Amino acid sequence: MGNRNELNLPTNEEILFLLNLDSAMIKKMKAGIKRTSYRAIINWITKYKVSPDASNLEKIKGLLESFYHLCEIEDWSAGEKILLISVGGLSESKLHKLLGFCGYYQLQIQVCQKIINNSSPNSVAEFLNSLGLAYRNLGKYAQSIEYHTQQLAHVREIGDRCAEGIAIGNLGVVYGSEGDFVRAIENFQQCLIIEREIGDARGEARTLVSLGISYDSLGDQHQAIKCYQQTLPIVRKIGDREGEAYAMGNLGVAYEILGNYSQAIECHQQHLIIAREIGHRRGEANALGNLGTANAKLEKYTQAIEYHQQHLALAREISDRRGEAYALGNLGATYMKLNQYSEALAKFQISLDIFQDIGDRFSKAAMLKNLAETYCKLHHYKLAFDLCEQALTISTELAIPLVKECKDLLLNIKEFIIE
């Protein structure tokens, strides 16, 4: 059985047939930009060769170059067909989805924006979805909400219930990324109703995980675990390896919060194995970060730092700003455990800057509280108090469990100030 990370591109003949292109037809065309462009496309498809160990981006370069030529001569129908080509092997098998799956978010945005205004109604829904996902993965939540809102209006207009559920669910994920978990849960519950109504098992599984993450963030780990455990038999039955990895990773997070570190590490290791098998780089990065956090809880700080540094490097490589901020924050927390306060302070500050930049108020509050604790250790009590008050204000607005931690820390800081 082949590695699911390997692409399975159509043959040159299949691509040319799909695009209705052949050399004899090109020869009969008038000399000019169209003839030159079609000839270039045939050359890219038939003559571009790469080594077996080339990156996925190198392997699809011929298709992407052909797409750009088609857009240049406004052959939108053929350009759309290129982006919808199945590349096999990976979970997100269409070309435009593959770009996001492999972490090429800017490129995914570029190709979808080039063609979206000249696509068929069903493809418009797909491209709006990809644009929303790409912007979310880049931490640009306002743009993500804008595209998913357009997606929702569009699919309701064309009467596509399945796509409606997807759009509602994606909006829920963005609301959760912004820290609005109550609104996220409302969206996911709407989404579940549609998915169960139309028998979309894969969608139901993803939504259950998203619900679990929201409950986790509100401090209800037992409800979260129920959601993840409902997910696993569904994804295993339908062979959704990416969905299984996603559920395992989040189940590990819930176990970790409850103090079940051995179970947590087991879940995270399974997540990492599956993510690497299917080539899901964002999932791999998340699993590395979660392994780092769990090892830190077991006071294995050297291993924890190694995992967090791997997470940081991979997050930066795929332009995952939110992941980068998490990795920096987790490194800071580990340095705190080692009493390396200056190192911790530097990591927390960069992490805070990123969370503030991308609009993640939930994580911003956590990082302000971490900075307050660090400054307290360095005897800068007034600054620590101010930072903790900011964290308390945000966490109170979001109604998250961090409120109690902030109140307790403020009481401790006050004692030092009074002394």
Image (tube, grey):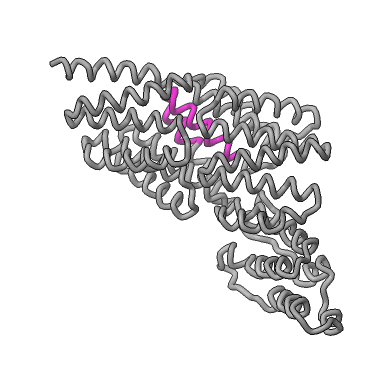
Q: Residue 210 at x, y = what percent?
A: 60, 31
In the rendered structure, the answer to whether residue 296 lies left or right of residue 247 reads left
Q: Is residue 286 above or below residue 32?
A: above
The residue under the point 60% across, 51% down is: 101
Q: Position of residue 62 (x, y in %)?
A: 66, 70
Q: In terms of image quadrants, where is residue 344?
A: top left
Query: Can you name the residue that lies furthest to the left here?
Result: 419
Q: Position of residue 390 (x, y in %)?
A: 35, 25
Q: Residue drawn at (79%, 47%), measured in percent from left and top?
A: 122
Q: Position of residue 153 (x, y in %)?
A: 74, 37
The secondary structure that dominates the magenta segment is helix
Q: Residue at x 42, y 47 (%)?
A: 311
Q: Is residue 255 magenta?
A: yes
Task: Look at the picture and state if 404 lies above or below 202.
Answer: above
Magenta residues?
244-267
> Would residue 382 appear left or right of 99 to someone viewing this image?
left
